[in-house]
């Protein structure tokens, strides 16, 4: 209840001017006026405050991995043999290719960057970064800020999509650079939808990306508590992306993978993938392993493993989109 009090100083002038009006009546009138003002104030609409999400806004999935390669032309030729075509490329001021986009499907790419002999930080082949596609990039960015993280501001990248980056856990040589993108209607990626999708592709989706970390336990905790990922019950080192993509990252020790990349691709026909590799004279290993899930059920997994010219590992499976990166025999 709200009360409005009338002071004696307020009443005295009224008593002198209106001696015939009872004091009680004057007090009632003043009190009524005060009540009316407060009621009107309470009725004034207050702008609603936007609700802060209680969990990470969903991802559409993995957008790309980026790797630095010794010879970009040789790497493009290798991924061509796997059936992956170059959707487009970027060139530097010297006219040389500075970035090649090898297409897995309409939403997923392998980005190739050449080494730079004049820069000690760029003169060796290595895994560079992993990029996630967000359904609403601004919502993801703002959620991370609310979580106490410090992503850079959302901006438009050279290919025409929205982009922001975030510093992640420590990798073998430097902190992880986590990238996020949202495909825009007029971007180079969107304009290439439905194109450069060869029939001879050995796989049609990237489902798992390995992340080599100096402290795997700390990296896992970061992704679970800060990034909104969830653990796979069958393999704690594999974490599910926020959303319903079914795609994952796998946290591995730095000395197990080093600076190389390792990804899992899926195909509806593993025999067709093996035939493509044989036809293109690409060396591969084919192995069968077993995996036991959280319920104790064991199943067989067939895996094809290949290595690109810089030793980056590509594994191809058919069973499910959640296969372990390291279930096959080592290369």
Image: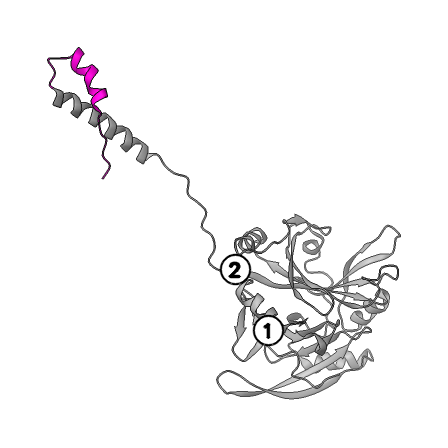
**In terms of image quadrants, where is residue 216?**
bottom right
**Residue 150, image x and y in percent?**
60, 54
Name the mark nearer the viewer: 2 or 1.
1
Q: Are marks 2 and 1 in contact (CB under 8 Å)?
A: no
**Left or right of residue 156, residue 29 in this image:** left
**Residue 12, image x and y in percent?**
19, 17
> Does the rendering let one see residue 140?
yes
**Left or right of residue 73, residue 169 in this image:** left
Can you identify the residue that label 1 sits on?
217
Q: Earlier in the sequence, mark 2 or mark 1?
A: 2
Binning the other alpha carbons within 10 Å of mark 1 as few (below 14), some (14 to 19) or many (20 upward) gives few
**In terms of image quadrants, where is residue 303?**
bottom right
The answer to if 271 sits in the magenta stretch is no
**What number is the disc on residue 56?**
2
What residue do we see at 74% from left, 85% from top? 285
Distance from disc 2 to disc 1, alpha carbons, whole Å, reads: 21 Å
What residue do we see at 41% from left, 43% from top? 48
Examine the rendered structure and indicate whether residue 325 appears above or below residue 86: below
Q: Look at the numbered disc 1 and give the secondary structure of its residue.
A: helix
**What number is the disc on residue 286?**
none
**Residue 84, image x and y in percent?**
75, 68
Q: Quadrant of the N terminus?
A: top left
111 vs 187, nearest the viewer = 111
Binning the other alpha carbons within 10 Å of mark 2 as few (below 14), some (14 to 19) or many (20 upward) gives many
**Residue 164, image x and y in percent?**
65, 53
> Does the rendering let one see residue 109?
no
> For the view shown, which residue lies furthest in the top direction?
17
196 vs 11, nearest the viewer = 11
**In terms of image quadrants, where is residue 27?**
top left
Looking at the rendering, the stretch of residues picked out in magenta corresponds to 1-22
Q: Look at the numbered disc 2 and give the secondary structure of its residue.
A: loop
């Amino acid at each position: 209840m709200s009360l409005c009090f009338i002071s004696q100083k307020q009443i005295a002038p009224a008593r002198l001017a209106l001696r015939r009006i009872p004091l009680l009546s004057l007090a009632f009138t003043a009190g009524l006026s005060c009540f009316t003002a407060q009621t009107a104030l309470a009725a004034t609409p207050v702008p609603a405050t936007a609700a802060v999400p209680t969990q990470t806004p969903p991802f559409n999935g993995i957008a790309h991995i980026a790797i630095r390669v010794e010879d970009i032309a040789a790497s493009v030729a290798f991924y061509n043999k796997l059936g992956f075509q170059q959707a487009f490329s970027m060139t530097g001021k010297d006219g040389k290719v500075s970035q090649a986009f090898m297409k897995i499907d309409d939403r997923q790419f392998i980005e190739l960057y050449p080494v730079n002999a004049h820069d000690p930080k760029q003169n060796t082949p290595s895994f560079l970064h992993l990029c996630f596609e967000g359904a609403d990039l601004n919502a993801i960015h703002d959620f991370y800020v609310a979580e106490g993280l410090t992503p850079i501001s959302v901006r438009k990248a050279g290919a025409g999509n929205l982009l922001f980056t975030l510093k992640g856990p420590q990798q073998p040589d430097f902190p992880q650079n986590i990238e996020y993108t949202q495909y825009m209607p007029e971007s180079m990626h969107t304009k290439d939808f439905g194109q450069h999708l060869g029939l001879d592709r050995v796989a049609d989706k990237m489902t798992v990306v390995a992340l080599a970390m100096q402290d795997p336990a700390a990296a896992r905790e970061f992704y679970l508590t800060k990034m909104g990922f969830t653990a796979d019950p069958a393999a704690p080192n594999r974490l599910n992306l926020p959303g319903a993509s079914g795609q994952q990252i796998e946290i591995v020790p730095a000395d197990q993978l080093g600076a190389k990349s390792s990804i899992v691709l899926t195909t509806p026909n593993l025999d067709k993938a093996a035939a493509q590799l044989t036809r293109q004279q690409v060396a591969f290993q084919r192995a069968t392993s077993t995996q036991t899930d959280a319920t104790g059920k064991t199943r067989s997994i067939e895996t094809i493993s290949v290595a690109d010219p810089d030793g980056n590992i590509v594994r191809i499976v058919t069973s499910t989109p959640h296969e372990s990166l390291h279930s096959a025999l080592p290369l």
